[in-house]
Image (cartoon, helix red, strand yellow):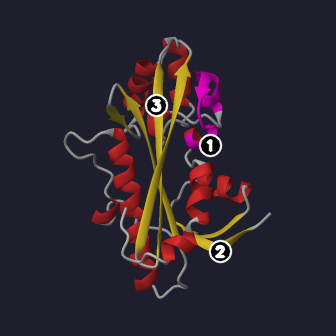
Amino acid sequence: MTLEPRIYLASKSPRRRELLTQIGVRFDLLMFRAPPREDAATDETPLAGEAPDEYARRVATAKARHGAELVTLRKLIARPVLAADTTLDVDGEIIGKPRDDAEAAEILNRLSGRTHEVVTAVALSHAGACECAASVSEVRFRRLDAAEIRRYVASGEPRDKAGAYAIQGLGGFLVESIRGSYANVVGLPLVEVMRALAGLSDLRARPGRRA
């Protein structure tokens, strides 16, 4: 099954590309400038006192809106722009991507033997409007020992991963159970994506609507 219309995916994540392909969504990549020349609109720095759910929604929405602006500036074919942001909620604290291997080890040690929430917000921008929805999944880690954490960090997989792990890769051995969407934990909740795409006709009819 192939879904219409073709969209732009404003993400460099290969996992999100794979998930969209899995459900038959046709897309082209829309790339942002990489550090240190990244645009202020795509800054992922949390705001003071910002909750994880609010953070993910804000960042995903900013990326989708910025992507739509780039479509116009680059004179590309007008299509909806899909963006997403994934973060962890640990006791109300935002846990994003580790800055280095030492921080990755600290995060994994903190997640060991307990449950955390994975929050992914999906934003779709089109025709001057932007809609955003978020999915939350509960993930429980088994208890990890120092050697396991050290070996996993040394694999390099935790780098550039929210929460310092990839459930679809080697990091699958960390997880004891999941409650909620597996795709959400990977980085793109497919139910929310399908709903967003299904609502495109409604989105077009409300050009002034903002997320």
Crowd class of label 2 (few under 14; some 14 to 19; many from 20; radius 10 Å): some
Tell me, yes or no, whether the highlighted magenta stretch contains residue 171: yes
Tell me the kind of residue under disc 3: Glu
Decide which of 39, 187 is in the foreground and name it.
Answer: 187
Q: Is residue 25 left or right of residue 32?
A: right
Crowd class of label 3 (few under 14; some 14 to 19; many from 20; radius 10 Å): many
Residue 173 in the image: state x and y as whole percent: 64, 23
Task: Give SS at disc 3.
Answer: strand
Name the residue at the right extreme. Answer: 1
Name the residue at the bottom extreme. Answer: 75
Task: Give SS at disc 1.
Answer: helix
Q: Which residue is mark 1?
A: 183
Residue 26 in the image: state x and y as whole percent: 68, 69
Precedes in sequence: disc 3 or disc 1: 3
Report the residue at 62% width, 43% height from top.
183
Tell me, yes or no, whether the highlighted magenta stretch contains residue 174: yes
Q: Which residues are magenta?
A: 170-184
Q: Which residue is mark 3?
A: 117
Res. 186 image quadrant: top right
Task: Give SS at disc 2.
Answer: strand
Q: Which residue is mark 2?
A: 5
